[in-house]
């Protein structure tokens, strides 16, 4: 029986779906909140790569399941580090809406990574 401290409620398959939602949010929300054009392009870049490696990772909803979950986790950690660093970018830091979005995206991404059962098997 698992203890509550080690309980990870998100399966690898669910993580894959959440990555798609994360990518769509990164691609669309900055425009909706009126972010600077350079900021919008930055997040579009984040969106493209998250959607790409998400679609190529091993889970039920992948287009081509090639990337194992341990590599996906490493990419997630690198991406979240980059998103955290974006908080210091002047065009984000000085715009309340952009900074709020960046911190929300970071929080959602961290929760998705921390709450995923990476040792579980995908049902793909």
Image (cartoon, helix red, strand yellow):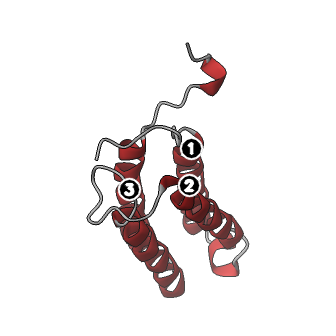
Q: Which label sits in the foreground, 3 or 1?
A: 3
Is 96 placed left or right of 41 in the picture?
right
Q: Residue at x 51, y 60 (%)?
A: 72
**Circle 1 is placed at which residue position?**
111
Q: CA distance from mark 3 to mark 2?
A: 10 Å
**Along the line of sight, the residue nearer the viewer: 6 or 20:** 6
Q: Image point 40% across, 76% down: which residue? A: 48
Q: Give the residue at x 59% y 67%.
A: 79
Query: x, y (%) of residue 110?
Result: 60, 49
The quarter of the image holding the N terminus is top right
Residue of label 3: 58
Residue 54 position within the rendered picture, expressed as x and y whole percent measured from the top left: 40, 63
Q: N-terminal of the two: label 3 or label 2?
A: 3
**Picture layout, residue 16 above or below residue 101:** above
Disc on res. 70 = 2
Closer to the chain start, of discs 1 and 2, is: 2
Residue 122 image label: none
Secondary element at image label 1: helix
Q: Residue at the bottom extreme? A: 38
Name the foreground residue: 102 vs 4.
4
Image location (x, y in percent) of residue 76 = 56, 60
Crowd rating for badge 3 (residues with CA inside 10 Å; few <14, some 14–19, many 20+): many
Q: CA distance from mark 3 to mark 1?
A: 20 Å
60 relative to 98, above or below: above
Task: Identify the secondary structure beneath mark 2.
Answer: helix
Q: Quadrant of residue 92?
A: bottom right
């Amino acid at each position: 029986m698992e203890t509550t401290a080690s309980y990870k409620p998100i399966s690898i398959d669910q993580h894959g779906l959440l990555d798609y939602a994360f990518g769509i949010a990164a691609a669309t929300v900055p425009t909706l909140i009126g972010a600077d054009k350079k900021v919008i392009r930055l997040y579009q870049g984040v969106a493209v790569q998250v959607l790409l490696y998400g679609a190529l990772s091993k889970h039920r909803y992948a287009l081509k399941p090639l990337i194992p979950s341990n590599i996906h986790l490493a990419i997630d950690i690198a991406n979240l580090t980059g998103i955290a660093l974006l908080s210091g970018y002047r065009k984000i830091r000085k715009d309340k809406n952009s900074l709020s979005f960046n911190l929300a995206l970071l929080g959602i991404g961290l929760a998705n990574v921390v709450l995923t059962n990476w040792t579980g098997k995908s049902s793909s």
